[in-house]
Image (cartoon, rainbow, N blue to C red):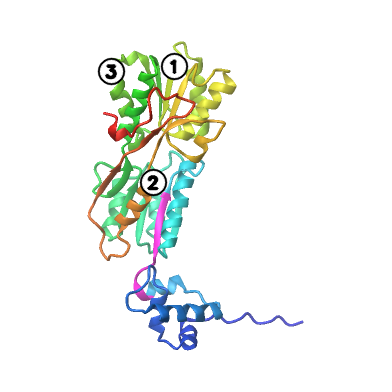
Amino acid sequence: MPRSRPQKRATSHDVAALAGVSQSAVSRAFSPGGHPLIAEPTRQRVLAAARELSYSPNPIARSLNTGRSAIVALILGDLANPFYGQVLQRFSDVLQGMGRQLLVFTVPARADADEALRRVLSFQVEGVIITAAQLSTSMARTCMDRGIPVVMFNRYIPSLDAACVRCDNHAGGGAVARAMLAAGIDRFALLTGDAQATASNERAGGFKDVLRAAGVSPGAIIERACPTTYEGGFVAGRALGRSRRRPRGLFCVTDITAMGAMDAIRFDLGLRIPEDIAVAGFGDVLESARASYRLTTLRQPMEAMVLHAVRLLSLDERTPSVREQVVLPVDLIFRESLVAPVASMRTDQAG
């Protein structure tokens, strides 16, 4: 039996003919975010014709015609960390709602983001959002020199004049320290991440600054760096629980690290949380609120952070926006792993 020929793909000219409009009207009808030069009844007529013909715009052809690809690159950290999964979902929802496409690149833990950025430059993207910790200023500047807006998300490079959106990491770390002091804790441990990660350093710095201001001696604070993974937290948490001067309070700069440490403390060492060791994290990923963890943590304003990042990309403009720095407050969310000594309060009001 002879094979049937594949059906010819409908073109914008076919849609224009069926709808009784010009080909440029079809293009305007599918413009991301709408187009001011097409009336709504005309747009609906074009969309109806497109559905009848099973037509969908060719993004490659559109980018060649307009010089705009409607593609935004997102460089993410290791997706084994649930924080990055939530970031991906939110950016996807917002950008797709604007008619944009998301091009995703992932950077494994402790890997260099520069290689991902080199791959980004082989595509015609309208903007780049970077969440991965490792990035050289030269690669980011290469994007900016080419007129591609770059937004740092949840981190920044002090020497780079790029727009960024992050939460108040220093204040968040300080809020955890105050909560532990108020709970009567006198021996502390701190699990940090990559030494080059600004977010990790700021969170750790805020925690230590408040403890030192309260008169806590350096010998009462154990600081250890570990991979910001579940496994990294498990190994570090087990070691801390076995140490001669076991801490009474443990602050982890990410939730995934805290959850690993909690499992080691409870199931490997048989200790109680918070009675033997109180634990706090940072991020408020979805898993942190589940019954198996009930982790006290700092909630980042994810929705606001994503919307600010998209705004800073200036996707509807031909030139990037000013290098704006957006810093948003976080909320200390008390759960069972560190009991609230007083009512929870916003860290920007915590003194």
Q: Secondary structure at mark 3?
A: loop
Give the residue type at disc 1.
Arg
Q: Is residue 113 left or right of residue 170?
A: right
Residue 126 vs residue 235: left or right?
left
Where residue 82 appears, as percent x and y from the top left, is 49, 41
Residue 226 percent location from the top left of the image: 44, 29
Q: Where are the magenta residues, as a range?
A: 65-75
Q: Does residue 322 appear in the picture of this structure?
A: yes
Q: Which residue, given by chain and number where applicable, does mark 2 sit on?
A: 131
Q: Residue shown at 32%/62% (left/top)?
A: 315
Amino acid found under the numbered disc labelled 3? Ala
Is disc 3 in contact with disc 1, using a CB cutoff of under 8 Å?
no
Question: Residue 214, labelled with which disc?
Answer: 3
Q: Amino acid at mark 2?
A: Thr
User: Would you identify the image quadrant in which residue 26 lies?
Assistant: bottom left
| Label placed on residue 248 | 1
Q: Secondary structure at mark 1?
A: loop
Magenta-span inclusion, residue 70: yes
Examine the rendered structure and indicate whether residue 29 appears above or below residue 33: below
Q: In front here: 132 or 277?
A: 277
Quadrant in which the N terminus is drawn: bottom right
Determine whether the residue tagged by mark 2 lies in a helix, strand or loop: loop
Q: Give 96 or 190, whichever is nearer the viewer.
A: 96
